[in-house]
Structure formats: structure tokens, C-alpha cells
Amino acid sequence: FDSKDGKLVVAHILVAFIALLIGGIAGLLQTMVKSGTIKLPYSIGYYELLTAHGVLMAIVFTTYFIIGFLYSGVSYTLGGKLLPVVHRMGWTGFGLMTAGTVLGVAMVLTGKASVLYTFYAPLKASPYFYIGLALLVVGSWISGWGLFYQYKYWKKTNPGKLSPLFAYMAVVTFLMWQIATIGVAAEVLIQLIPWSFGWVETINVMLSRTLFWYFGHPLVYFWLMPAYICWYVIIPKIIGGKIYSDALARLSFILLLLFSIPVGFHHQLMEPGISSFWKYVQVVLTFMVVIPSLMTAFSLFATFEINGRAKGAKGLFGWVKVLPWKDVRFFAPFMGMLIFIPAGAGGLINASNQMNAVVHNTLWVTGHFHLTVATSVALTFFGITYWLLPVVTGRILTLRMNKWGIIQTIVWCVGMFFMSGAMHLVGLFGAPRRTAFTTYENQADAANWMPYYVFMAIGGMVLFIGVLMMVVNVVAMLRAPKGVEAYPLGEAMESAEATPVYLDRWRIWIALSVLLILFAYTIPLIDMISSSVPGSKGFITW
Ligand code: HAS
């Protein structure tokens, strides 16, 4: 692996794990502050800690990890080295993102931005928090443009050739990110920054939430798609098998590009100001975005089964036995896949209008996203780290680290079982999410919720041990003995049909994606902008 590119990748992965560590500490402290077990100095309270936890884990950890991982695959598969200009763009993006992160996190930790990771208006943060966010997004754009550039250059110098699957998927992921982040950029630049500086007095709350969710739902697929890259491209190689179908993998990514954006209303089903017709349209589109995930499940089962049979496995589930259970590079992402089955089912419940009325704004939703992003995605990212760091630093993964990684994965699953399980259950009894206990401690229901809170706290502590174990392993990997590990890149089965060229016709897919977005959003947005509801002055949170 090219050593200069390796340094760029390591820089991203390191920031990601520093964010995981600080975010983990904030996560542990917020449960203790919420339950009244401890009191912190400088009036650091529940909302400050919860915001730090959410921003660092859900936004900083993921974005840095994803860019580091995708840059590694693009460098490896598109020429073995990043072009000098792309390398510079990667570092420029990294610099801007880091400046934004430091500014944003400083605002959160000093209590000037206790607006949670969704930073909904009318809660108002310091303008510097929003400027930090804007820098993070612009930095990620520059990194994404670098990736597009390398891909375009490769296509030009390899006319008529099918692009490598990893690179193709990385391009779709960043295309989706590019289109989706326009929403949050508009919200931050046009609405939040002028309002928080006091240049305008009021803000259109409905519009700001809609722009947020136009971005917020594809954000969750921005987390998921790199995990899918691992499941489709890397896992077949690690288990000693082949990719079931290159064409199916590409098609599922194109469907994710088309359907993951025009669905933000499924986060706003309980909100007034959006007509039920447009909510209905976006719920239908939400069920469309489930299809590529079902295709992914199908493809994974096919890969596992065909691989098993080739190794002599018999019976319906004989293939399970021949999987490399003692290899953490497989085990951690596999646990992520397994948990994605109930996690995805929870998503389908959320998306159903009537059931959303039961679960919305309860701890059920918190349980849902701790299974999806904090387990399926996080465990896959951990699994990737176990080969990525050795590959890009020219070191090896020792047996001891591998064993420690397996234990870490089990610790994570046990912690999540208690925490997320209790969240799902108590959510069904109406326990609210993201609300300080003092707000409702005198309600009759609160006492019934207590036993579940205890399980949540136990699970949270186990998970914190999991964070520490992972960080220890990352440090150990950076100091591991020198050696050469191969980049585990799978190949498609020989029997698979040739990939149709139309999957590479970017203009068609981008145009279709834009058309779907215009269809799903134009009329509701016109309604929101032209409605006579007065804007809100907002609530300053510090
Ligand atoms: Fe979600 C809320 C609907 C997927 C994350 N979601 C959230 C929030 C987050 C989040 C962070 O419709 C909270 C936002 C906030 O703060 O308010 N979600 C869905 C649906 C899906 C879904 C329909 N969510 C995700 C993923 C996330 C994520 C992925 C992160 C990565 N979600 C919602 C809705 C809400 C919501 C509503 C709003 C709730 C509210 O009221 O506020 C679908 O994409 C899920 C499809 C998945 C599947 C599973 C496929 C299974 C696979 C694994 C195969 C396993 C194998 C191994 C092969 C259909 C691919 C098996 C081996 C054996 C041996 C058996």
C-alpha cells in the first residue's frame, strides 16, 4: 500500500477513534447525570453531554472513518496510488473538517451549543457551532470531489473497462452524500447562521426541520453504505469465497442513491404543516429504500451458502459451520449483519404511520439507532479497522489482537443487548427520548420505567468497556510488528453474468435521483415557505 496514502488514511482513522473515545466518555457521563448519580462542575448537564455524545459518535466518528476507508479502497483499486492533486484534496478536506470539528466540539463542551446532534430550531446555539458544522461539511465535499476526480481519471485512462466494484460503490456513496448535504448546507447557511448572529429575528422552524431531514435520512445511509461495501466486497474474500454478483451489488447501490433521499418525511410523520398526501408519498418511497437492503441480505446468504457448499458443507445451514468464526475481520462485521435483521425490522415499524404514532420521540427510536448505526455499522467499522490499519501501516494483526477483538465484539453485543433491548421496551411504555429525568420524575409512569433505566445504565457501562477495549486495540495495532498484510478485496464468481453497462451511466442515475427529489419535495416546500405561520425567535441554549 502506498505509504503517503497510508498516512492520509491513518490520520482519518485516528481522529475517528479519538472522537469515539471522547464521545463514549460523554455517553457514560450523560446516563449518570440523567439518573442523578453524579453532578459535574461548571454546570455541565445532561443536554451538554448528550449533544457531545451524539455529535462525536454519530457525526465525527462516522464521517472520518468513512472517508479514511473509502480513500484507502480508491487508492488501492484505482491505480494503486492517489493522484497528487487528489492527495492534496484529501488533506485539505481533512484540515477543514478538523478545524470545524474542533470549533463545534469546543462550543458543545463549553455549553454554548446544547442543541443535540439534530440541532433543531427553535433551539439556538452559538453561531460558531453552526460555522463548525459548515466547515465539516465543506471539508467532506472536497474529499468527495477528490474521489470523483480519481475515478474520472481512471475511466479516461481505462476506456471501455468496468470500474472496480469498490471504487464504484465509493462514488455512489459520495454522490448521495453530495446531493443530500445540500439540504443541511442550505439550513445552516441561509437559516441558522444569520438567525444565531441576530441578523434576522425569526426562523421558519418547519422549513429548517424539513431541510434537516432531507439530509438526515440519507445521512444514515451514508453510514450504512460503507458497511455494505465491506459486506459485499471484503467479507467474501475474508471467508475464502467470491462475490455473489457484481451487477446485483451495483444495482443495490444505485437504488440506494435513488431512494435514500426523498424520504425525510418519515422522521416528521407526527409534525403538523405537511399534508398527509406528501407524508404518504414519502412513506411509499421509504418502503422502496428497503429493497436494496433485502437484496443485500439475499446476496450475503448466497455468498455464504455457495462458499459453504464449495467447502463440502451439507444441509440447510451447514454453511454456517465453515465460516471463519475465529477471525475478527469476519466475526465483528458478521455480528453487525446479524443484528441488522432486528434493527431493520424496527425501521419498518418506525416507517409505518400508525405505529410511528406509538414510538415517535420515545426511547424506542434511541434503541433503533443504537442497533443500526451503533451496532451494525460500528461493529463493521471495527472489523474493517482490524485489517485496514495493518495494511496501510505495513504491520500485521497479531493473534493476541485478533483474540482481544473477538472478546471486544462479544462485549459490544452484550452491552447493546441490555441497553438497546431496554430502550425498545421502555419506549413502548411511553418513556420519552432525550429528556432530562427532572422533567418527568413526578409522573406516575416514571417509577415503572426505572427498572429499564437500570438495564440501560448497565448496558451503557459494558459498552464503555467495549469502547476502551477498541481504543486499546487501535493503539496496539499502530505499534504492531512490521509485516505485509494484503488488502482483502473480493472477486465476483465466474458464473455471474456480465455487469450491464447502463449501471455506469451516471447522468441517468443522477437525473432520476433529482427528479424523485423534486417530486417528493417541491410542493411541500412551496407550502412551507409561503405559509403565513409566523417565524420563531427561538430559545438560546446558553
Ligand atoms: Fe432508521 C429513525 C426507518 C434503517 C438510523 N433511524 C432513525 C434514527 C436514526 C436511524 C439515527 O420511518 C433517529 C433519528 C433521530 O435522531 O430522530 N430506518 C428506517 C427504515 C430503515 C432504517 C425503514 N436507520 C436505518 C439505518 C440506520 C438508521 C440503516 C443507521 C445506519 N428510522 C426509520 C424511521 C425513523 C428512524 C421511520 C423515525 C422514527 C421517529 O419517529 O423518530 C431500513 O433501511 C431498514 C432496512 C433493513 C433491513 C434489514 C436487512 C438485513 C440485512 C442483514 C442480513 C444478514 C445476514 C446474516 C446475511 C430490511 C442486510 C444472517 C446470518 C444468519 C446465520 C441468520
Image: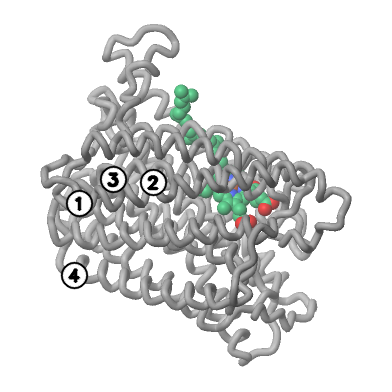
Spatial CA span between label 2 and label 1 = 16 Å
516 over 251 or under it: above or below: below
Q: Residue at x 48, y 66 (%)?
A: 181
Spatial CA span between label 2 and label 3 = 29 Å
Q: Amino acid at mark 2?
A: Met
Mark 3: few, some, or many residues within 10 Å (few <14, many ≥20)?
many
Q: Residue furthest bottom?
A: 199
Q: Residue at x 54, y 68 (%)?
A: 183
**Where residue 251 appears, x then y in whole percent?**
40, 40
State which quarter of the image contains the C terminus. Answer: bottom right
User: Which of the four quarters of the rendered structure image does ligand 1 lie in?
Assistant: top right
Question: Of 408 and 145, which appears nearest the observer?
Answer: 408
Name the N-terminal-most of marks 4 and 3. 4
462 over 188 or under it: above or below: above
**Where residue 430 appears, x then y in whole percent?**
79, 47
Residue that label 4 marks: 85
**What is the image's colouring?**
one colour
Residue that label 1 marks: 479
Q: Residue at x 40, y 39 (%)?
A: 408
| Camera sees residue 294 | no
Mark 4: which secondary structure? helix
Residue 469 badge: 2
